[in-house]
Amino acid sequence: QPCVPLQANVINLKTFLSAVRLAHQGNDTSVLPLSPLVPAKNSDVEKPKTKMIITSRRDYPLTKSFPFSLEHLQTSYCKLARIDSRVLCLRRLRKLDLSLPCRIGQLSRLRFLSAARNKLPFLPWDFRNLSLENLDLFGNPFEQPNPLVPNIQLKIPLTLLECAARATVNHRIPYGCHLLPSHLCKDLEVAKTCRCGSACLSSFIQITVTMNLHHVAHTVVLVDNMGGTDAPVLCYFCSLHCYSQFLDRHHG
């Protein structure tokens, strides 16, 4: 669970810490420098924020974190091309309206999602793991999928870093900033997944394929004025073998 920052009067906090130290040293608690407890007023207690609506790019929190208590986050009409992965820390989130992080499939409790009228050319590969009640992607400039024109980033032979990263993710080996540089930890957190289930970091083949949005949502708002409910989703392959197998199945 993420840490939640606490606010306190500096003088009172120092007095409290001093009292804790004296008590720990075995001093008589009756003479500790503590003032009587006064119940906090309702007006003094800040309620956890459960809803945040952002309608302008200048109001988007670039330097501050989102409140961890959020259940509804909306950034409609901000014309976002991407959003950082801080959204994935919002474990209580139930309604989301924004552009899509690549690991959005981790939000297992998400039921309502709108990313209408943004600039999404395609959906992240993890999108297929969602289970939604309502989905609205209307008005995005989705690209036409073409699996026969891949983006090949495959490096053969694989680098030692790529082999180690794949093994770490595939075998669920624990890691952290106390063991690895922070930039490697971030890369591992957004590692891509091949159709075969194996991970790939920076060596892969990428294509876009068509997905019917009813596969992930019960109710789907049409994506265009033509009545479509299909959208392009990114798809990754960890090897030429996996890509060839995909082509054989779909274009054989």
Image (spheres, rainbow, N blue to C red):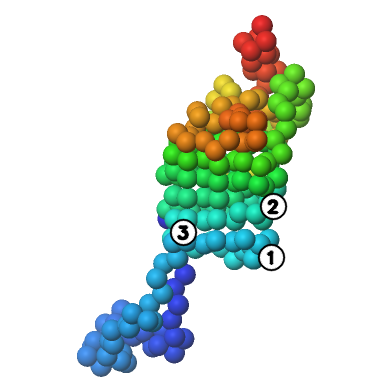
Tell me the CA gap for discs 3 and 1. 20 Å
In this rendering, which labeled residue sits more in front, label 3 or label 2? 2
Residue wearing tag 2: 79
Q: Which mark is residue 58?
A: 1
Q: Label 3 sits on what residue type?
A: Leu
Give the quarter of the figure containing the C terminus: top right
The first of marks 2 and 1 along the sequence is 1
Between 90 and 111, which is closer to the camera in this rendering?
A: 111
Q: Relative to residue 111, is residue 205 drawn left or right?
A: right
Q: Label 1 sits on what residue type?
A: Arg
Is label 3 in contact with label 1 (beta carbons under 8 Å)?
A: no
Residue at the spot 57% in from the left edge and 21% down from the top edge? 196
In this rendering, which labeled residue sits more in front, label 3 or label 1? 1
x, y (%) of residue 113?
A: 52, 45
Please tell me whether mark 3 sits on a helix, a strand or a loop.
loop
x, y (%) of residue 27?
A: 27, 86
Image height check: is 122 above or below 85?
A: above
Residue at the spot 69% in from the left edge and 65% down from the top edge? 58
Residue at the spot 47% in from the left edge and 61% down from the top edge? 51
Please tell me whether mark 2 sits on a helix, a strand or a loop.
loop
